[in-house]
Amino acid sequence: MKVDRALGCAAPIEWSALEAALDILCPMHLRLTETGHIIHAAPTLQKMCAESDLIGKRFLEVFLLDRPRAITTMSELMARARSKLHMEFRVAPHTSLKGVLVRLPAGQGALVNLSFGISVVEGVLDYRLTSADFAATDLAIEMLYLVEAKSAAMDASRKLNQRLQGAKLAAEEQAATDTLTGLKNRRAADRILAQKIEESGAFALMHLDLDYFKAVNDTKGHAAGDHVLQEVAKVMRAETRKGDMIARVGGDEFMILIDDEVSKVKLAEIAARLIQGIEKPIPFEQDVCNISASIGIAVHLECGHLDLDTLVQHSDRALYASKDKGRACATFFDDLEAPKP
Amino acid sequence: MHGLVNKAIEAFVIDTYGAQPWRVIAQMCELDDPHFEAMMSYEGDITSRVIDCATRVLKADRADFLQNLGTYLVSQPSQQAVRRLLRFGGVDFVDFLYSLDDLRDRARLAVSDLHLPRLELREHTSNQFSLTVRSKLDGFGHVLVGLLTAMADDYGALVMLDYGGRRGEVETVAIALLERSFAEGNSFELGARV
């Protein structure tokens, strides 16, 4: 009880002078009687509550102790002298405060000093406080400055992030490449096919779908799946010519444009080589992945022969015919039976 | 300098002279992007280059341009944040003047890579002060003259400011406080939301 004894050494305290000093040093302090009634409230607290709500009221009637929670009587509160208290006003806006209580000597009651702590931002708003309401040494103003400066900086950063994110999406949107395989993506494929049709070129479109790929992904994981896709891309590059277009248009779905080639024999050969290449076991870490491919082939003969949608539809139907036949094979759209009306 | 400084110059030119002159200035300075990003860092000499190009394109006197920039930073409604953050520095204008010594550190607390020039206030008499600023950027003192004029208005103080020239990298501004509370000033609430 070092502090208390220090206060207790001299003659009776002259409260008016001391309180005037304390009001400047601790503008949020209260003096309590031994019974816990408030007999003095410093200026900032006076500004925060009507005087009648403070003076003469019991401390525990005005404040609800949050921590330590067990405190309900003045003697319990006095026993917690010099340790940190957490409390809130019992009336709205229920501002939370922290504080510390010091007992005065010779049964003269106690002093409680209060502070907003982290609730200072709401506190100044709720009570319209100014710099003058805080002690000159209080860091509250610096804290408010920092909160405001940091939120302004954070705001600017957030805006920058949003713009960068937008730019990234736009760049991805415009990209023509599938990042995993380095092949063309769907958007590029559509553009190139449309252009090719317009140029009236004769070409074949192969729609290729991997067989058993889902099993690889499910049992060996996405890393294995990604590796398989990259290996498949290599096979397709090896089995096609430079001017042909290869695009990954879905998870395990590809489109290959074989330029200037409509001979069924040649195309069947290419398809067979593709399937053969893809069926070669693909080592991954200590494991081996086995897949195959089904292919549908549609041919575009001359300008105005087919539009893009129809051509893709043809290749798609041929592909599903291959799947129906038991996979790992290629089918020409031309060989399908005419659809029933 | 920091993107915040460059962005402030850009905003000043656009708000005061329009978007078209700014495009001309950005082109003349060969900026990669005609708009600065507030939260990015830029190479050091870009700020001087922008100011040089701006004064040429706008046919403005360099000192006037910089002084108006300083005023703009405090008094333009869209730059409220600057005024408020400066007002946290002091309860009255003299208190505020003394807080300028810490301005550099305060700015760095908020944005760690923002390095503002070092300011130092000297009190000659209770009404006579001088502020020195050390900066590679020639004319930073003029920005301060504009900024202090606007802040004095904001506090309601009556002051006379005098740019004292540049020696080496140091510029001086003389401040004569004629009246501490000449006018009402603008209100400043600690907890206002901007």
Image (spheres, grey):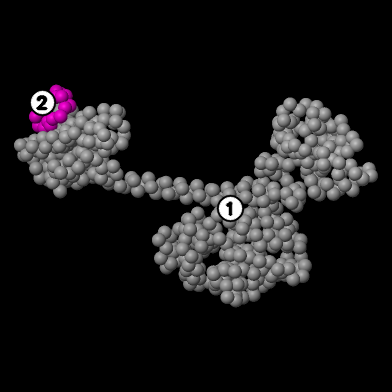
Q: Amino acid at mark 2?
A: Glu
The quarter of the picture where the C terminus of chain A appears is: top left
| Quadrant location of the N terminus of chain A in the rendered image | top right
Residues in magenta, as a range: A323-341
Task: Find out whether residue A338 is within the magenta segment.
Answer: yes
Identify the residue at image location x=70%, y=53%: B187
Q: Nearer the viewer, mark 2 or mark 1?
A: 1
Whether residue A250 is visible:
no
Q: Nearer the viewer, residue A228 or A82?
A: A82
Q: Residue at x 74, y 30 (%)?
A: A64
Q: Nearer the viewer, residue A181 or B88?
A: A181
Which secondary structure, mark 2?
Answer: loop
Disc number for residue A337? 2
Instruction: Identify the residue position indicated by label 1 in the image.
Output: B110
Q: Residue furthest right?
A: A11
Q: Is residue B153 left or right of residue B139?
A: right
Tell me where residue A248 appears, x and y as whole percent: 24, 39
Residue visible at 55% across and 71% down? B138
Say which chain tag 2 marks. A
Check the residue under mark 1 and report the chain it is in: B
Residue A271 in which image quadrant: top left
Q: Is residue A6 left or right of residue A203?
A: right
Q: Is residue A175 above or below residue B63?
A: above
